[in-house]
Amino acid sequence: MTPPELPAIIVEPIVRAALLEDLGRAGDITTDAIVPQDAPPLAATLAARKPGRIAGLGAALTAFRLLDPDVRVEVFRVDGSDVVRGDAIASVTGTMRGVLSAERTALNLLCRLSGIATATYALVAAVRGTRATIACTRKMTPGLRTLEKYAIRVGGGLNHRFGLDDAVLIKDNHIAAVGGIRPAIERARAGVGHLVKIEIEVDTLEQLREVLEVGGADAVLLDNMSPAQMREAVAIAGGRVVLEASGSVTAQTVAEVAATGVDVISSGWLTHSAPALDIGLDFAG
Amino acid sequence: MTPPELPAIIVEPIVRAALLEDLGRAGDITTDAIVPQDAPPLAATLAARKPGRIAGLGAALTAFRLLDPDVRVEVFRVDGSDVVRGDAIASVTGTMRGVLSAERTALNLLCRLSGIATATYALVAAVRGTRATIACTRKMTPGLRTLEKYAIRVGGGLNHRFGLDDAVLIKDNHIAAVGGIRPAIERARAGVGHLVKIEIEVDTLEQLREVLEVGGADAVLLDNMSPAQMREAVAIAGGRVVLEASGSVTAQTVAEVAATGVDVISSGWLTHSAPALDIGLDFAG
Amino acid sequence: MTPPELPAIIVEPIVRAALLEDLGRAGDITTDAIVPQDAPPLAATLAARKPGRIAGLGAALTAFRLLDPDVRVEVFRVDGSDVVRGDAIASVTGTMRGVLSAERTALNLLCRLSGIATATYALVAAVRGTRATIACTRKMTPGLRTLEKYAIRVGGGLNHRFGLDDAVLIKDNHIAAVGGIRPAIERARAGVGHLVKIEIEVDTLEQLREVLEVGGADAVLLDNMSPAQMREAVAIAGGRVVLEASGSVTAQTVAEVAATGVDVISSGWLTHSAPALDIGLDFAG
Amino acid sequence: MTPPELPAIIVEPIVRAALLEDLGRAGDITTDAIVPQDAPPLAATLAARKPGRIAGLGAALTAFRLLDPDVRVEVFRVDGSDVVRGDAIASVTGTMRGVLSAERTALNLLCRLSGIATATYALVAAVRGTRATIACTRKMTPGLRTLEKYAIRVGGGLNHRFGLDDAVLIKDNHIAAVGGIRPAIERARAGVGHLVKIEIEVDTLEQLREVLEVGGADAVLLDNMSPAQMREAVAIAGGRVVLEASGSVTAQTVAEVAATGVDVISSGWLTHSAPALDIGLDFAG
Amino acid sequence: MTPPELPAIIVEPIVRAALLEDLGRAGDITTDAIVPQDAPPLAATLAARKPGRIAGLGAALTAFRLLDPDVRVEVFRVDGSDVVRGDAIASVTGTMRGVLSAERTALNLLCRLSGIATATYALVAAVRGTRATIACTRKMTPGLRTLEKYAIRVGGGLNHRFGLDDAVLIKDNHIAAVGGIRPAIERARAGVGHLVKIEIEVDTLEQLREVLEVGGADAVLLDNMSPAQMREAVAIAGGRVVLEASGSVTAQTVAEVAATGVDVISSGWLTHSAPALDIGLDFAG
Amino acid sequence: MTPPELPAIIVEPIVRAALLEDLGRAGDITTDAIVPQDAPPLAATLAARKPGRIAGLGAALTAFRLLDPDVRVEVFRVDGSDVVRGDAIASVTGTMRGVLSAERTALNLLCRLSGIATATYALVAAVRGTRATIACTRKMTPGLRTLEKYAIRVGGGLNHRFGLDDAVLIKDNHIAAVGGIRPAIERARAGVGHLVKIEIEVDTLEQLREVLEVGGADAVLLDNMSPAQMREAVAIAGGRVVLEASGSVTAQTVAEVAATGVDVISSGWLTHSAPALDIGLDFAG
């Protein structure tokens, strides 16, 4: 199921800032100098130049709308659609200045978010039939986290925590600071409300056993373990906690990881390095 | 020569916003719940996990400084340095909360910008000995354009225009709107000040000849031409305008493009799809 | 244990905005007109005029510091301290303009947040010895949620979700929209990541039984139930989910509610109606 | 007479920020996960659960409108209306997501502002027939001063100064800094424009006499005087200045204070401690 | 007496925004490209090129400090000083980039504000010996009102109201809307607090008489009256209200206006059309 | 040709901020207190009180629209029109509060920008028939640069660089820092992209000759040269670079400067000291 679009109150300010960044202090000086005031409306089509999954169409269309409130929009492929090269995604018809000045901002958003959704979906498809879900990380573009988390969902993935404040993730340094896994989990449990989950990162199966013995953790992050270790971790955990596999997962290795029986496979690559999806704006005529 | 760092007045607000995005409404709840108030300072080292070129260290260190004004920093490799796997880039020693809470934001910025600088430098190295310089485009991350343009410079590239307002770039639609290359250039020339350059995009050598005949353009963008066409374009232009090659340039093809004699080779891939450079934060002990 | 203070990067912008709201377009015109430029420094003491628990001292002192960076501060009672009438909380010595102009903003923050901590602690004390913890709600002051959630923690309470995005809380309308408790929980579980908890609101014990049968919920909110019903709910749940009692809890009734065996008692009154704690600024001499 | 509503240009940014604070980085994840895209519109009614005076309906309805621009609104009781338990105040019909996501923000604003108006009106009613008006202070919620000052007016009160910059209020420290009441008033008069009023705080009738003798003050604040002292102050002043009674005024004591003949009775309690008015959102069916 | 400087919390954000407006998306590209990283510090002196009164030096120096926190500053002539051509106002010594990049922003602020102070002082000097004070209007530069109002004070003038919200000014349309001067003043008096002054604009002496008869106004604005009319107005008012002369007052005519006995002479020209004071930055060597 | 209007996305935030600056914390208290809720709409006309050229009408009308979305507007004279005293520029009909509260902000913007356009056009007219164009500088009002640059274009002038980042302007200090004109130009050329122009400031003809010999500069700024020197500079340059005359150009001297054959004449006076154009708002009836 495609997730609902983000509310406009969240998306619009991001798009507005992106447009202003591009318009700078004088706006589109090329169009201003050349295009006559009475130029006819311009029609253009967002079209895929490579296969992939669309995400961020709402943001892209907002760019056109912010520069031309009367732009006419027709959507052919909503977010979550899988397109092939040449597919028309949406068309816009508006003032020449509005369409031309918004083009780059619209594409910058749409190509990036679609790239993330495409990469996510590739992993999701690769693990189909296993119990594993694909999750993102916090390795995201500063300023775009909300949009990128959304693109992960559009790709069929699920979101890891949004920031430092909505879930507990206990790491080496936390454990060391307080002298062990038990006090770390206990202090975490005592310090946060009843709607906050606790995950703890482990490097060894020994640590996993200790976590299970202590109890109180909702999930365990298996850091850079081999598939063999993960399989053993699954056996050890026996469903008592959610197991998350983390490390350098790629489209090549993800199926093998999923086959170990872990519940969640997270990948930072999806947002820090996935290539943009190639989408262009074609003009009629 | 490494370009000067961006002034703090530009960088700090971006880092501040990135930190706030990660801290959310409650801050680092894991550290808050677990780490004792009197925990000892934490020392950590930014270290390369892959070879590449460093860019954005100033932004990364700003993240630590904003959460711990007294953090002690030692820099081993400034922006523009080329590192190999394992190289220490800088060390930070500060409060445990400060260091742990800033870690992800610092790395998100440093890895992304270093990824861009690394990719840029790969192209720059590949065209060494030719007259060609490597340039970026406006296919950039919304909100980070200033930082990404800077990373291009650190990689040895030069910046294309920053936005729609600091140079004229005449495209198909502008030409069509006004009925030809001549009126487009003339209107542009008449409409902008004496410190604005004019570039025009052409698809054919025929168009290039017309541009040269009309005069008034400072640069011509050769859109998706073959190396053979580019070579001919260089001959036709005879140094009268700057020639920019644009299209799907890759590390594999860039040398061939440069060999045609064009002046500038621009690549959107550098900023929309270059992978992040893998840099981690290692903790002492 | 007193929770760690919020990071300055979160607190300072709120205090800054509060000061600017009070300074308006011309600053403190009274002090400007009357006090000579060479007036001696002013010393003043934040003192409790009523008993209660202190919260927000960091924000209050930030107000003085923002108007006089060289202000000298001495803290006698940190956040989480319980004071009686007359207790000195902290002293400030700075420029006359700085101290006088910051006074009201500092007190507005300190009195409000201490009022919340005081009210919270009253409930916490009343349920001591039971398994119940005290939690807040989202009935908070627009713009101050982060600070108010912090004050709840200082009072010994725990935070409910911070907003609409960090935990699932299924209510009547959600259940109705999808035709039942089972599909509601199932859709929620499928739609959110592994670090998001799910709570569901029920009006009847019948609904509670259905929730338990369906499984997948981490917590159940018992809406406006009588103590007798709550006691039965505790028996029914048998520790399989966290039970939250919600409704018009007061200092008078909270002990009775806690005695039912529920895990969490939440109160909106703590933030929407708790009176400010009376704290004043006393000047030396 | 009910005061005019604040202009939207002032109110909307506050409501927008409040919504974004609640929506966080992912929006209403409960509704997003559960409610089908084609769910029917939701109708709901803002209804009083306690008697009181309504203030802030415009802000509350703005919350719904910002999340669903097409929401249909019907207003039954405008700001300034006095309601009894059960009274319908307004109805909204809109998208399920819009209505559910805006609910808490709308109520947070409406209940708080109505609480202030209700408390204010209680004092206003208690002094009816005397010459006294009820005024607020600057003991207000940071960030909401404009709205809270408005709620005071809706309650029938009048506003004290808005901040440090729109009127002079001379206090002890100012007098001490310059060596007496006379130089304080004279310097104030010389330092501000002809549209700024001057009030001075006095603790004793002696000081009041000195103020009157010096002249130049528009108002005198009688700080924590007994009714007997106030009555004497009224006699001494003989109408030459406005007299403001300040101190711990309550609904119980205000009539006695008003009976002394003072012109203005100010109360910080109205905004720092008045309880919210209980208003809920009822859903049809 | 020179008025106290505006607090940094008000001034700094304005200067910061001005610098960012000038630095744009890439900073000072000239200095970055040319000046070596190890260039020696640069010393420069703000010097008057025309006689006038200095205002805004704090804002100007803030510009240098924001780009070079370690800049050394020496002040020779504080705000309110009257300088002649060639006078050194202050010197700055800092990094070459800091000094050169801040130069224009510093001068833009200093020249404009000094221009206003100079023009104001010219009027103030021209009316010396009369009872008239010089006041500004709301005909000010959007975004700079706080600074410009300050410059008026530095010039020896007094501020008219700061905006629409801190004093009542009744004009023709208000009177017409409510059917006469009496109801207008009465409604104003009833609608605002005891610290708000009321001024009313009149075109004729007839209207002035009516205002006095009605009572309740603190000041009367005589709109575009001749000196003869003003003199008569002064006689009619007999000191019962403050009289403000408004219209096209110039340095040539202001003495004649002042001689009529009015209390306040206001001039919009001081802020909308006064020329900047010519101040430059001289470099050593 | 009149330049296209700036896009609303740039203009509206400036106008919005200007309105909020004027409305302050309580809005238009005069109108609120006096004008009945059911007052009839108010019609008013923006009318020239002096001859000049209109610029900024869009910004002015935006002010009315932001306070009354339903205001009806009729435009008689668009930006770039030359008006005489008494000419109606546009009419607005809206709520009394909307029209009265927006009046001052609308006029502040319109009068200032029209003043700049008027002053610019005076110079443009004075050099008609020569090759010279009129340009502005960066001596602009902080916060209004985009609008003021636009007003220059409306006046028939062309824009100099917008900030420190969109063109290179080499001055004395840059040359001194690097030891000569040649290295300065060479470093500049190497350090910036192919769409950035380079201008260099010279004080003597000797320096001009050196610049030409070095090559690489697009323009040369002749700083404070006499007409005789400029004429010689034109002869020396022989069309190889753009020559800009800068210094104290006035309407009196500009024709003589233009007659020297320079290409560009720049004037800071246009934006730092040009008087506002007198435009008023006339009310019907």
Image (spheres, coloured by chain):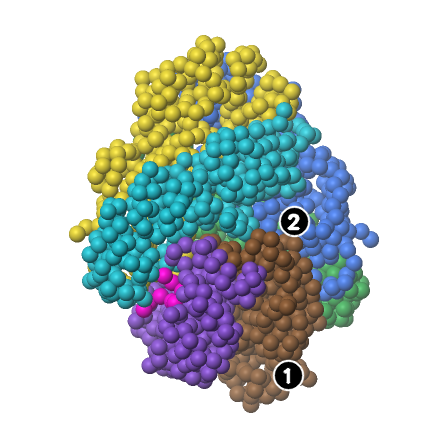
Chain colours: A brown, B purple, C green, D blue, E yellow, F cyan
Q: Position of residue C13 (x, y in %)?
A: 46, 51
Residue E231: image quadrant is top left
Q: Is residue A159 above or below residue A40?
A: below
Element class at badge 2: helix
Q: Is residue F35 above or below residue B176?
A: above
Q: Are dots 1 and 2 on a single chain? A: no
Residue in the image at 22% along x and 59% along y: F209
User: Left or right: B250 with respect to A255?
Assistant: left
Label 2 environment density (alpha carbons within 10 Å; few <14, some 14–19, many ≥20) = many
Q: Which mark is residue D63?
A: 2
What segment carries the magenta color?
F190-197
Residue A62: image quadrant is bottom right
Chain of residue at mark 2: D
Q: Quadrant of the C terminus of chain F?
A: top right
Res. C17 visible in picture: yes
Farthest left residue in view: E285
Residue in the image at 63% along x and 39% along y: F73
Element class at badge 1: loop
Q: Position of residue D88 (x, y in %)?
A: 76, 42
Amino acid type indicated by mark 1: Val
Q: Position of residue C231 (x, y in %)?
A: 73, 60
- Residue C102 in magenta? no
Q: Which mark is residue A127?
A: 1
Residue in the image at 49% along x and 81% along y: B226
Chain of residue at mark 1: A
Residue A146: image quadrant is bottom right
Residue in the image at 76% along x and 39% along y: D76
Amino acid type indicated by mark 2: Ala
